[in-house]
Image (tube, rainbow, N blue to C red):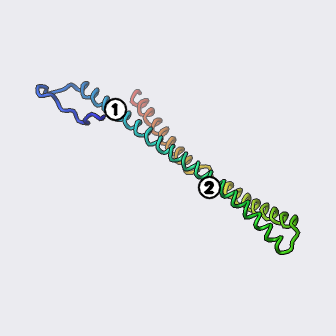
Amino acid sequence: MADPAVRRAAAGVTDQSIGDLVSVAARDVSQLVRYELELAKLELKADAKRLGIGAGLAVLAMFAACLVLMLLCFAFAFGLNALHIWLWAAFLIVAGTCILIIGIAALVGLRMVRKLDGMSKTRRSLADGVSLLRRGKSRSSARASAKAS
């Protein structure tokens, strides 16, 4: 699949021109890039497959958790009924408990979302890199204009 990285000169050839060496180097670099891209595609495909299977299993687990939660709610309501609370009142108590849990979870989730900083470190790093590139570009253009004068 891969050609050797170092090419040996033929027995009768002693010197190669610089153009030949550059073309061989360019061909080797482009072949290396193609192989790297092929490897990345294979790894991405395997990761996507694992991600799909993991997501499917997570959905199945959440569905089962919902069923168990429903069964626990019924057990809670009938347990309250066994304590001589009217059945309709027991189900209202269970519904109120569920609403309370949902509200607490929503508040905690909202606080967590508000604390997101929108990848500020990444944005700062990219801005620093771009500014360095622009500064280097402006210095080189200033040097070129100084040499021209």
Q: Earlier in the sequence, mark 2 or mark 1?
A: 1
Image check: 5 left or right of 69?
Answer: left
In front: 56, or 51?
A: 56
Image check: 145 left or right of 128?
Answer: left
Of the 4 image quadrants, the one containing the C terminus is top left
Residue drawn 30% across the image and 32% down it: 28
In front: 129, or 39?
A: 39
The quadrant holding residue 33 is top left
Q: x%, y% of residue 98?
A: 77, 62
In space, the residues marked 2 and 1 are separated at their CA atoms by: 45 Å
Please state which amino acid type lies under the numbered disc 1. Gln
Question: Which residue in the structure is indicated by mark 2?
Answer: 61
Image check: 101 left or right of 126?
Answer: right
Q: x%, y% of residue 14?
A: 13, 28
Residue drawn 19% across the image and 26% down it: 16
The quadrant holding residue 77 is bottom right
Residue drawn 26% across the image and 24% down it: 19
Q: Count neighbours of disc 2 (C-alpha within 10 A) and say few if under 14, some if 14 to 19, many if 20 or more.
A: few
The quadrant holding residue 88 is bottom right
Q: x%, y% of residue 42?
A: 43, 39
Of the 4 image quadrants, the one containing the N terminus is top left
Question: Which residue in the structure is indicated by mark 1?
Answer: 31
In front: 73, or 141?
A: 73
Q: What is the secondary structure assignment of the residue under circle 1?
A: helix
Q: x%, y% of residue 58?
A: 60, 52
